[in-house]
Image: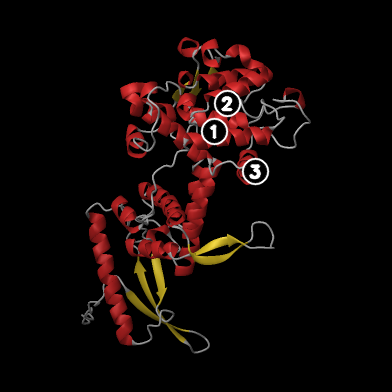
Amino acid sequence: MPKRKRRIRSPHPGVVLRRRTWASGKTTWFARWTDPDTGRVVDTNLSALGLTTLETRREWALARSRSLNERRAALAAGAPTRTHTELDGAIEEYFATRTRLSPRTARTYREGTDRLAAWARETGVQVTEDLTTVRLATFRERLSNEPRRQAQSGAKRGTWAEGAGTRSPYTVNRDLCSVKALLNYWRRLGLVPQLDRDEITDALRPLLEPRPRPRPLKPLEVRALIDACVRHDGGSDLALGGPSQRLTKGPAPSTMAITPFVAFVLLSGCRLGEALQLRWQDVDFDARDAAGEIILEATATKTRHERAIDLSVAPTLRMLLAILRLRAPTATHVFGGDRPLSQGRVVAARKRLIAKHKAPEFNWQRLRQTAGSYLTNAPGIFGAASAFRSARQLGHSVTVAERHYVGNIHVDPAATTLEAAMGIQDRIQRLVASAGGASLIPETASA
């Protein structure tokens, strides 16, 4: 019997080193190994990695063999199987499945995920499985040090240039929030096996940003705002319709009336999107013993929780809505007619109010904060349940009302309505009377 050749045990089991000589005479070294997760045979070009000596190739093969053994042991212990998912494709699949996101939210999420994709291409991260805590921390530092963008003067609309300083913490945190939502979605699908919820939260922790307390409009500022709206609308249409429905006499204006919309946001506490999308079918004039209420459906609110807005706290608001309804009996939306009023038009009107008509500095969020502040601090409206009732009226938690609104403004204890607390009851009643709604005002109120 011939003597059998003795088999020599490999110092790096599972990893085979192979040499290939090309026709040109050039020699290339490869390492062949089997991926324990997918079962695929993988060939790694060691020469391309700069491993040109026997010692460096041996050290690489030993390290790879140890990692393969550890991975096989982890899989045997029940660890989830890793996949190989292209990062760009996974991002597109994420947005394809997020069909319930509003267009504005989708745009915001897209800005953050686009920055993640750009960073991944620059750093060589091609698959989601390669994302680690260290790499996410590097991405966070990259975001926090990005230069500020500003519109380029004299260039085409939408052209941006680098400005002085870095982006604000608020902008950076918005992108971090978008990326965290994406990573947690991948985590639930098992596409980021090297990350868990705590690691994602820790690696992408938000930057510290200043959080000033809400600054509600004071009574003098609220009155100045209504006066500026009237100056802006002089001869405008109360119902945001045609020239036959103008509030006062005079030529038809080139801009839309803004007084009804500003008064509605100020006295209802609605968010801008909720006010723009409000339909007449959501307004019930006979509810609450004819005091009236507005029912915002769950799909129309930011929190996706249906809520009711009690109009008894602002009786003149009900009068304004009644006039708008009488003047547009076939309209679908309260503001805009058959289609909702565009956000661009009210944003432009706000800028005109401040720049041309001496209105105090405000935005739509500040009007909502003003309504919440007066409702929370007016003992004559909701009594001892003011924090709870104002939170229900505005659609946020009681904690938010107590943290941000309690004590930030003084309200006359004798005021029993929101417009009286703001000091604009006489102004709103004059608007109602001039629009032909004098019969809607109670005699005690008009006296």
Q: Quadrant of the C terminus?
A: top right
Element type at mark 2: helix
- Tell me where residue 73 sits by quadrant: bottom left
- Tell me where residue 139 sits by quadrant: bottom left
Q: Quadrant of the N terminus?
A: bottom left
In the rendered structure, the answer to whether residue 171 lies left or right of residue 197 reads right
The amino acid type of the residue labelled 1 equals: Arg
Asked if the residue at tag 2 contacts the one at tag 1, i.e. Cβ–Cβ closer than 8 Å, the answer is: yes
Q: Give the camera-side residue of 69 and 102.
A: 102
Within 10 Å of disc 1 (Cα), the crowding (few <14, some 14-19, many 20+) is many
Within 10 Å of disc 3 (Cα), the crowding (few <14, some 14-19, many 20+) is some
Element type at mark 3: helix
Q: Position of residue 420 (x, y in %)?
A: 47, 24
Report the residue marked by disc 2.
Answer: 427
| Label number found at residue 409 | none
The amino acid type of the residue labelled 2 equals: Arg
Report the residue marked by disc 1.
Answer: 223
Report the residue marked by disc 3.
Answer: 352
The amino acid type of the residue labelled 3 equals: Arg
Q: Give the CA distance from mark 2 to mark 3.
A: 21 Å
Q: Position of residue 113 (x, y in %)?
A: 48, 55
Q: Position of residue 430 (x, y in %)?
A: 61, 22
Q: Position of residue 443 (x, y in %)?
A: 55, 11
In the depicted structure, whether residue 104 falls above or below residue 27: above
In the rendered structure, the answer to whether residue 184 lies left or right of residue 268 reads left
Q: Give the CA distance from mark 1 to mark 3.
A: 17 Å
In the depicted structure, whether residue 378 falls above or below residue 41: above
Question: Residue 89: in sight, yes or no?
Answer: no
